[in-house]
Image: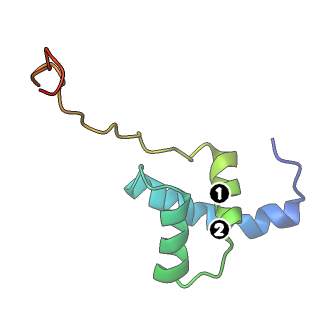
């Protein structure tokens, strides 16, 4: 629940509608890409922190899964049996 005034909620309503439309089309986009699309693509002058706050309040903020580095298996490499091998 937000403790913001109704005037601020009215100002945030069109921005929130655009965020929800972009999240519907691209569900894995984060706050930075949403901001870039609104700022550069739509020409909307808006702060990055405001986008993040609105997305967190609406529950639309998700982190992409972290990718693990692929490791080569160590069981296939020869092991030395004596010094200087």
Helix, strand or loop for disc 1: helix
Q: Residue at x 82, y 47 (%)?
A: 2
Q: How is the image coloured?
A: rainbow
Name the residue beneath numbered marker 1.
Answer: 52
Relative to residue 52, is residue 5 drawn left or right? right
Q: Residues within 10 Å of mark 2 (few under 14, many from 20)?
A: some
Tag of residue 48: 2
Q: In the rendering, at what x and y percent does residue 11 appear? A: 76, 70
Relative to residue 11, is residue 43 drawn left or right? left
Relative to residue 36, is residue 49 drawn left or right? right
Q: In the rendering, at what x and y percent does residue 60 appear? A: 56, 46
* 3, 40: nearer the viewer: 40
Residues at marks 1 and 2 touching, judged by CB atoms closer than 8 Å = yes
Helix, strand or loop for disc 2: helix
- Residue at the far front: name it: 83
* 12, 70: nearer the viewer: 70
Mark pair 1, 2: CA separation: 6 Å
Q: Is residue 22 above or below residue 1?
A: below
Instruction: Tell me the quarter of the image containing the N terminus.
Output: top right
Q: Residue at x 48, y 60 (%)?
A: 21
């Amino acid at each position: 629940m937000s403790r913001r005034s109704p005037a601020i909620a009215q100002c945030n309503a069109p921005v929130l509608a655009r965020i929800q439309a972009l999240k519907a089309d691209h569900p894995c986009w984060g706050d930075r890409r949403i901001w870039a699309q609104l700022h550069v693509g739509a020409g909307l002058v808006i702060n990055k922190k405001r986008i993040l706050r609105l997305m967190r309040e609406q529950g639309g903020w998700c982190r992409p899964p972290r990718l693990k580095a692929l490791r080569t298996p160590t069981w296939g490499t020869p092991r030395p049996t004596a010094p200087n091998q």
